[in-house]
């Protein structure tokens, strides 16, 4: 038996798998995000641990015998979060999350001061990454910075609470900007640029390797027969790739979660910093990946639902079909954007609203806008020489067949939909836990059973290509106007 824990932004998701990777139980515990200032995004680290306790307590009630037999636990988590601990392992402040934009000034200064961020880190210095967050703390909260004995990513704080060990994995740690991504090790030069040393970083292991074992106290609490191995795990997108079997070079998936991701597996470190493509280590050994990342995907639908005082599900249910692009255009930049703009200041907008515009048209525009942003990601990957003709879809947004039809037609790719598309990261985490417990990756990362395959809709391809050309003109027009 194996457990996958996915520390998401809005919830902790957990699954319990059998030896054949069949689903025995699942549980979810909600999380909240605090926004104390415009552009800020924070979370209490201890809320992750409380949520993990909740889901594991659920497993103990639902499947106590199966839980007792668990041999491995894998971890996944939202990337880039700056979790600062003191010498006693206590959080010094709320975690600064991946979608926090306060460190724009520090990003510009770090890129100028240390060119190796682009060379070794393989990514533009963006406010979402961990390194500029620490530079912001260094400049604005010097007392906190002086007390910082350890910097962990969100899932690695959960690991610390599970095992008592400070450990990180390659895929998640690549998103800090302190890793020499090609060498899969911390870079002294990049750490020094933000006033840190290796002593303040966790030990590194591969995602499928053991990082420690569950503490004796926790084994007693949840009734484990023997202490399960805790795997290195992975950042949420690398873990999702493990969950959908995207571990071989050339395999790809699209994630429609809070954020949006177009992910492609590579056999080598392949940076493309000019177009804000993310190039990271994968969660499996000797493998890397590229990502085009947009900061708001299903979050755009959540925002629209709150604004119109209805649920996102009701909004999409009212849109039963599309005969072409929406008459209204939407830029999905609620909190800035990464690929391809690397622009923390840009904000979302609707264009083309008229007297006839209703809730359904606005919903259609949001679905289109997210799809257009994913097309931007595909174009950025194409510049880097990466081609895609098929992707797997994961995340909550993958439940909308209509949305996937729009994406397939716009990107001109076939979109495969796994049966359990909403459990990509937790499934990948559980598989990594299985690999760590068995000591091998052989046969672990098979592609899941598919619910459907969605091909481009022929009569939508040309209209959406034309609409994308118009949509691309909105961003430079807004920037010129000062928005």
Image (spheres, grey):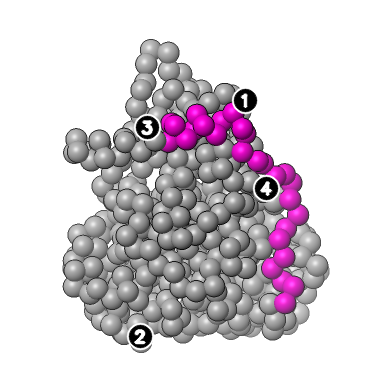
Q: Earlier in the sequence, mark 4 or mark 1?
A: 1
Q: Earlier in the sequence, mark 3 or mark 2?
A: 2
Q: What label does residue 198 carry, if any? A: 2
Q: Nearer the viewer, residue 41 or 377?
A: 377
Instruction: Read off the magenta span.
Output: 442-468
Q: Quadrant of the N terminus?
A: bottom right
Q: Earlier in the sequence, mark 2 or mark 1?
A: 2
Distance of mark 4 from mark 1, alpha carbons?
Answer: 19 Å
Q: What label does residue 470 carry, if any? A: 3
Residue 447 among magenta residues: yes
- State the residue lying farthest toward the bottom: 199
Query: Looking at the image, is mark 2 or mark 1 nearer the viewer?
Result: 1
Kindly identify the residue that appears in the image at 34 percent across and 27 percent down.
Answer: 351
Percent from the top left, x then y, of residue 83?
Answer: 39, 69
Residue 436 visible in rendering? yes
Kindly identify the residue that appears in the image at 70 percent across and 56 percent down.
Answer: 26
């Amino acid at each position: 038996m194996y457990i996958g824990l996915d520390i998401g932004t809005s919830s902790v998701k957990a699954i319990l798998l059998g030896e054949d990777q069949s689903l025995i139980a699942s549980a979810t515990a909600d999380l909240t995000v605090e926004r104390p200032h415009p552009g800020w995004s924070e979370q209490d680290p201890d809320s992750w641990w409380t949520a993990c306790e909740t889901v594991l307590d659920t497993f103990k009630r639902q499947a106590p015998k199966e839980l007792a037999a668990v041999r491995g636990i894998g971890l996944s988590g939202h990337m880039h979060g700056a979790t600062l601990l003191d010498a006693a392992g206590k959080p010094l402040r709320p975690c600064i999350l991946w979608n926090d934009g306060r460190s724009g000034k520090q990003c510009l200064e770090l890129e100028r001061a240390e060119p190796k961020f682009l060379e070794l880190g393989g990514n533009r210095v963006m406010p979402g990454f961990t390194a500029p967050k620490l530079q912001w703390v260094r400049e604005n909260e010097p007392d906190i910075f002086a007390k910082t004995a350890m910097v962990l990513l969100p899932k690695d704080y959960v690991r610390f609470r599970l095992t008592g060990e400070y450990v990180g994995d390659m895929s998640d740690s690549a998103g800090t900007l302190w890793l020499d991504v090609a060498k899969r090790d911390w870079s002294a030069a990049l750490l020094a640029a933000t006033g840190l040393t290796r002593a303040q970083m966790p030990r590194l292991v591969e995602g499928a390797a053991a990082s420690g074992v569950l503490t004796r106290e926790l084994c007693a609490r949840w009734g484990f027969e023997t202490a399960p191995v805790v795997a290195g795990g992975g950042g949420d997108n690398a873990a999702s790739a493990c969950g959908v079997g995207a571990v071989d070079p050339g395999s790809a998936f699209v994630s429609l979660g809070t954020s949006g991701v177009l992910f492609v597996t590579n056999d080598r470190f392949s940076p493309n910093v000019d177009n804000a493509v993310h190039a990271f280590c994968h969660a499996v050994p000797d493998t890397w990946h590229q990502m085009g990342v947009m900061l708001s995907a299903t979050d755009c639908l959540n925002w629209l639902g709150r604004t119109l005082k209805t649920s996102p599900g009701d909004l999409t249910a009212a849109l039963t079909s599309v005969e072409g692009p929406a008459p209204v255009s939407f830029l999905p930049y609620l909190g800035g954007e990464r690929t391809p703009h690397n622009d923390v200041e840009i904000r979302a907008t609707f264009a083309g609203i008229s007297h006839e515009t209703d809730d359904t048209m606005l919903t259609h525009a949001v679905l289109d806008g997210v799809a257009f942003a994913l097309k931007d990601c595909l174009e950025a990957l194409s510049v880097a020489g990466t081609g895609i003709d098929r992707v797997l879809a994961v995340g909550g947004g993958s439940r909308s067949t209509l949305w996937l039809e729009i994406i397939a037609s716009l990107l001109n790719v076939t979109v495969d939909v796994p049966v359990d598309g909403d459990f990509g990261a937790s499934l990948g985490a559980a598989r990594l836990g299985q690999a760590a417990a068995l000591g091998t990756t052989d046969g672990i990362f098979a592609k899941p059973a598919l619910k459907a395959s969605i091909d481009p809709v022929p009569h939508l391809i040309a209209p959406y290509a034309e609409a994308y050309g118009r949509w691309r003109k909105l961003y430079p027009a807004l920037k010129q106007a000062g928005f």
